[in-house]
Image: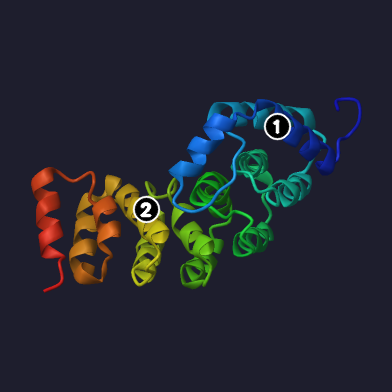
Amino acid sequence: MASVKPTPREVAKVSLRRLRELADPVKAEGVRRYFKHAVQAYGVSAPAVRDLAAGLFRSVRGVWGVWEAVALCDILFSEPELESKAVGGLILARFKKDFPPSLFGKVKGWLAADLLDNWASVDVFCTDAMGAFLEKHPASVGRIKAWARHPNRWVKRASAVSFIKLAKKREHLDAIYEISASLFPVEDDLVQKANGWLLREAGKGDPGRLEAFLLRHGPAIPRTTLRYAIERFPGPRRKSLLERTRAR
């Protein structure tokens, strides 16, 4: 692969062959039991997946641009196994300095088409690649707010987890709290858990603002979201918030 510029399809073939070689049926069955909804997996460990992605990236570094990496994702995201999707996302994230604004629509299309059809694939991709995208293109923060109202559960979850790494930066807190409130009516537990995770991260730098937000919205907050959001508060305060936000 080093002598000529490899195509996305060639890199995808190498990736899939290597994943099949590393496959562990026992681990794959454990992965399937761990998820609440049906998933497919090779049973390859996360470190091995990351090593594979790193090696494949080295084979194209300097000869590929971001759109070759996008084309690779088109192929690997269409594969059913978790690890295939992870390899594609990890390689694309290596091109984050070159992410163009038009990538926003491409990502939304992948999500809405259920190509990232489980919480792990959404989280791996969005916390890294989409977080980097929003940091590079802050104007898209306003556009991603609409994802919270999208009918697809993975688009909704992505609206929250894309901000996980950005939550520590105060300039994003207004958008984070707006998105979080937009997700309160959603009954999907995978969205509720992601929302609570986001609030917990937002509260690390400003716990007072998080507490005020929770008290203001009170009974509108799903209890699953609330429990995740208050995990880092001391025990007595968690108990108080659970009581003070309960519907009367």
Locate residue 14, reporting x and y percent: 78, 32
Pick the quarter of the image with the N terminus.
top right
Locate residue 225, reporting x and y percent: 30, 58
- Horizontally, residue 235 falls left or right of residue 137, namely left
Q: CA distance from mark 2 to mark 1?
A: 35 Å
Q: Nearer the viewer, residue 230 or 75?
A: 75
Element carrying mark 1: helix
Judge whether residue 61 can be spotted in this image.
no
What residue sits right under mark 1 in the picture?
A: 20
Locate residue 205, reporting x and y percent: 29, 46
Residue drawn at x 52%, y 72% is 151
Image vertical order of residue 32 relative to residue 156, above or below: above
Q: Nearer the viewer, residue 56 or 248?
A: 248
Image vertical order of residue 17 relative to residue 79, above or below: above
What residue sits right under mark 2 in the picture?
A: 198
Amino acid carrying label 2: it is: Leu
Please tell me how crowded label 2 is: few (under 14), some (14-19), or many (20+) other residues with Cα within 10 Å: many
